[in-house]
Image (cartoon, grey):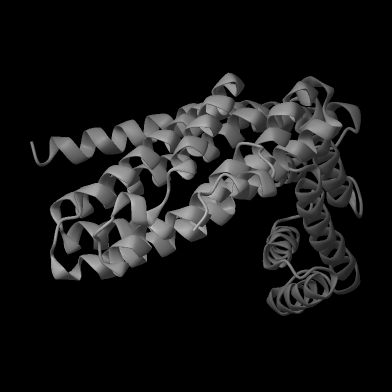
Amino acid sequence: MTIVGPFVTQFATGWRRLRDSVPAIVQITVTAAAAYAFARFVLGHDQPLIAAIVAITALGFVRDARPVRVLETVVAMTLGIALAELLLIGFGQGIAQFAVALALTLAVARVVSANATFAIAAAVQCSLVMLVPAPDGGPFVRTLDAAVGGAFALAATAIIPRDPSRTAMREGRRLIGEHVAVLEELAAALRSGSTELAGRALSRARATQPLVESWTAAVDSGLAIARVSPLVRRSRFDLERQRIMLSGLDLATRNLRIIARRIEWVLRDGRPRPEVADVHTRVGIAVGLLAESIRDVSAQPVARQAFAEITRHLDPVAILPDGPIGDRNTITALRPYLIDLLTATGLELDAARALLPSD
């Protein structure tokens, strides 16, 4: 069982990864084959390997499939190829020539762009040109192939786009799902008085920043694609709505870490706090409704109403009339978190703050 369990988990994770990558696989495959075929049969190039390589590399499996990112990769690779072909014409092939060409390509690429990946993409293509025998067709045939591959890659972002809304939705649900998990662990820690559980929730909360960044990249990329592709233009409404949610949840994620840190500190006395646990449980349930609203817009007002009801009654003195100041502070720490969640549902900041009970 100890051997089969991890294998099954790994297989399931790999299967989900494959399922999520199917649109990218189709886009890359069709584009690379089309670029190669165009260079081979239309331009008459004997071995237009570069056309396929540039198309594959420019599109890739990255979340950020914005046209500007694809264009940046195409420019980097074409620059490396063109510089290498210039040096190849002037000085010929050889280890020394390769070293000079590589150093020069890296230097020029660093001047052109601050992105380190830009320089590496240029260097890889420079190496390919300098070390692989040149095909028939005269000078700069590979530069032309790179331009073909790049043009097909850029066209693919509009003609064969990946589903930007689906990708962004998946990333958003992952982030909100982590909020729910952290709140559930904090509630369990408060109910049992376990510092260990609280520490685990704190570690989990501290690891959420990459999820915020992934969702941000997916939303920005999706909006950029939707602007140029008529096939996914209908996704703009959902993506704009997700951008509003992301703005609030970015702030909420930071506040979640503060909440987890405060609870971890308070629980060092080992005393259970069931009343505080109940509040965190209710917040976790409401956050689950927010996760559902990414997929179903009709759930958004339901989530807003749930947050509003919790916020209206978030009075530390009323919840813990005889509680110590440290316990009351764990309730107070939820206030900015809930305000951020309310703005994530589209409620104006002032309206969200007005829901808080007066001190």
Of the pair 113 and 54, the residue shown nearer to us: 113
Residue at 69% of width from left, 28% of height from top? 238
Q: Residue furthest left?
A: 1
User: In this orientation, does residue 22 appear?
Assistant: no
User: In this orientation, does residue 127 appear?
Assistant: yes
Is the residue 222 above or below the residue 204 in the image?
above
Q: Position of residue 76 (x, y in %)?
A: 79, 59
Q: Quadrant of residue 115?
A: bottom right
Q: Quadrant of residue 279?
A: top left
Is the residue 266 above or below the residue 249 in the image?
below
Of the pair 237 and 152, the residue shown nearer to us: 237
Q: Locate residue 120 relative to residue 146 in the image: left or right.
A: left
Residue at 67% of width from left, 32% of height from top? 164
Q: Locate residue 75 relative to residue 119 in the image: left or right.
A: right
Of the pair 9 and 48, the residue shown nearer to us: 9
Q: Position of residue 51 (x, y in %)?
A: 77, 41
Total numbered labels: 0
Q: Quadrant of residue 202?
A: bottom left
Residue at 75% of width from left, 59% of height from top? 129
Q: Locate residue 240 relative to residue 144 in the image: left or right.
A: left
Q: Position of residue 28 (x, y in %)?
A: 66, 33
Q: Locate residue 243 relative to residue 153 in the image: left or right.
A: left
Q: Quadrant of the N terminus?
A: top left
